[in-house]
Structure formats: C-alpha cells, structure tokens
Image (spheres, rainbow, N blue to C red):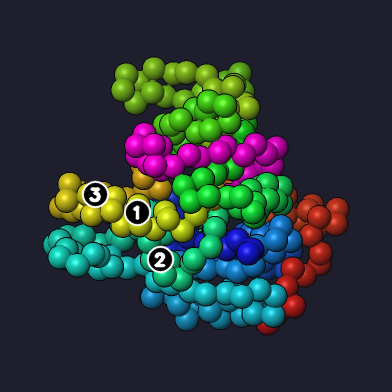
C-alpha cells in the first residue's frame, strides 16, 4: 500500500503576511506546496490529504486543488477551534485552533495507512520525500515504528534573521528527544549559534546537527495516541488562550513511555521556506534554477 501525504495548510504565517501557502513562487506561479505534492508523487506516495480552514476553502480549491485532480487522489479535512472531544467546549477568548497535532487529528478516519506529515509552506526537496517514502513503504513496518526526516541544521537557516528549530538527540539512529531551540542564527563568524532561553547564554551548533522540520512518518495507531494525549492536554491547558498541542510533545511522550520509536532519516536535502519577507526572492531564484537545470519540468501538473 502506498503511503499518504498529510499537508498541514490551516495556519497562516505570523511573520509573513497573507496566505503564504497560496503565494506563487515558481516560474509559472507554482506554490511551495505544488513542489511538495510533485515530489511526493515522484517518490511513491499515493494520495494527498490537506488540512485547511473552512474560511479559505473556496480559494484553496480554486488556486491549489484544481491543479492536482488529474495527477493524484486528493482529500480535504478541516481544522477549527471547536473541533474538540465530547465533553469539552471552547473557552471564551480562544481564537486559534489547537496546534499541529490537533491538525493531524482532523484526518483520523480518513487515513488508514502509513502517512507522512509536512508543513504546507516549507520546501523539503526531492530526496527528503524519497527517504521517508521508502521507510513508510516497508512491508515489515509495524504500528508504533515512526520516523522523521532529520535535516542538517546548516541546510535550514536563513541569512535574514533567527529561526526556531527542533534540535534532535539520537541514539543508534533513533530519536531520544527534540528540544525546541529559538533564536538560531549565524553569528559574525558565520557559525550557527542558538540562545539558551534559560540563561541567555549563546551556544554553537554543528552544521550537521539533525533538526526536525516537521516532516514526520507515522502509522495509523498515532491517531489513538493523539486523541488520548489531546484530552490530557485540554485538561491542563484548555484555559490558556494561546496554548498549542504540538507534534513533538506527543512524539516525545510516546518515546518516553516506550509506546513508539522514531527512526531519524538522514538527508543532505536543503530545506527552504519563507520565514521572513526577505526570504521570498531567494526562494523564487532557487526554484527558477531547479527548473532551469531540469530537476523540475516546465509545468509540474497538467490540471487547470
């Protein structure tokens, strides 16, 4: 059975105005998401499920989905702040949905096969899709045998400001923990450094250090674990207006409980995305060069 690609497209960039998932950055107006779908198709994925919000469904179907109809099976599910388990209600003052792992829960019942999860607005590169498709297509893959693409931090930073990354610790190729490090940037010597928020001390990061860019490979049992952990999250944080239920926190809990393992898949692929408005031109130039050198055809899809 071919794996499915789950694309988290319900969020809007906090530092880059507008629906950046729908921003045409390729030579023919392709979105970053178009490249992810194309690369997934080439790598052997059989279906794409998008998590979106109801309020931009019409624009999304018109601008994005119409392109894929002739190429791959596509489904849409919706994330909303009121999608809560029975017995819970949205507290006053809560506006945003409940985070990335809540978005995954929206596809429970729609996905019944191994699946990969990505952000809609990140360019992950062809090799990343190949390595995770190979892992998710293993005939001996068992429930709870998860994986993630470990990008090398040196391939994920921007010259235009600091970024947050999930810095990974591994043992025998398996993830032991992910620590969210904020304020990762280049220093004056062009070394990669981060600021430890506990004491504001500055530390170097080796360029090959694996980081999570939210490219996870999961088996369907993850939905049951997520439902359980979401209830626990709500019991603790439902009245905290900006609290979010994130994928790494759930994965970390399952690893510590011995309920799952996560293989870290190495790739030399270069990640890029539009974290800051100044990043956009770099993305446009890079994609133009990938079309020019034949990595991508003139048109990715033959749809509308």
Residue 188 vertical position relative to residue 282 in the rendered view, above or below:
above
Q: Residue furthest front?
A: 140
Q: Give the magenta part as a residue range.
A: 251-275
Q: Residue at x 46, y 36 (%)?
A: 166
Q: Position of residue 176 (x, y in %)?
A: 46, 30
**Residue 107 visible in the shown view:** yes
Q: Which residue is mark 1?
A: 226
**Does 16 sit above or below residue 18?**
above
Judging by the rendered image, the residue that carries numbered circle 3 is 233
Q: Quadrant of residue 115?
A: bottom right
Residue 262 inside the magenta-drawn segment = yes
- Say whether disc 2 or disc 3 marks the residue closer to the N-terminus: 2
**Crowdedness near tag 3: few (<14), some (14–19) or many (≥20) residues, C-alpha within 10 Å:** some
Q: Please identify, in this view, whether the residue under mark 1 or under mark 3 is nearer the observer.
A: 1
59 displayed left or right of 287: left
**How far apart in space, not on screen, are marks 2 and 1 (Cα)?**
10 Å
Q: Residue at x 68, y 55 (%)?
A: 284
Q: Closest to the observer: 93 or 264?
A: 264
Q: In which quadrant will I find the N terminus? A: bottom right
Residue 108 - label: 2
């Amino acid at each position: 059975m071919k794996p499915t690609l789950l694309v988290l497209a319900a969020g809007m960039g906090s530092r880059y105005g507008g629906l950046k998932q729908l921003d045409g950055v390729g030579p023919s107006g392709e979105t970053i998401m178009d490249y992810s779908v194309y690369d997934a198709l080439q790598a052997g994925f059989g279906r794409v499920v998008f998590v979106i919000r109801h309020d931009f469904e019409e624009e999304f179907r018109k601008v994005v989905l119409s392109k894929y109809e002739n190429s791959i099976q596509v489904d849409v599910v919706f994330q909303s702040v009121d999608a809560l388990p029975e017995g819970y209600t949205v507290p006053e003052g809560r506006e945003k949905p409940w985070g990335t792992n809540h978005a995954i829960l929206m596809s429970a019942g729609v996905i019944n096969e191994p699946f990969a999860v990505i952000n809609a607005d990140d360019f992950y590169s062809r090799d990343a899709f190949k390595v995770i498709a190979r892992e998710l297509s293993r005939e001996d893959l068992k429930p709870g045998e998860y994986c993630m693409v470990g990008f090398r931090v040196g391939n994920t930073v921007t010259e235009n400001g600091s970024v947050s990354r999930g810095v990974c610790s591994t043992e025998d190729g398996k993830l032991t923990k992910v620590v969210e490090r904020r304020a990762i940037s280049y220093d004056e010597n062009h070394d990669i450094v981060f600021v430890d928020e506990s004491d504001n001390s500055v530390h170097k990061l080796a360029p090959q250090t694996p980081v999570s860019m939210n490219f996870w490979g999961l088996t369907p049992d993850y939905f049951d674990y997520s439902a359980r952990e979401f209830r626990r999250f709500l019991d603790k944080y439902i009245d905290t207006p900006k609290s979010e239920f994130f994928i790494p926190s759930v994965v970390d809990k399952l690893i510590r409980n011995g309920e799952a393992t996560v293989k870290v898949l190495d790739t030399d692929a270069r990640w890029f995305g539009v974290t800051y408005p100044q990043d956009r031109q770099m993305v446009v130039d890079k994609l133009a060069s990938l079309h020019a050198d034949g990595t991508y055809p003139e048109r990715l899809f033959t749809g509308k």
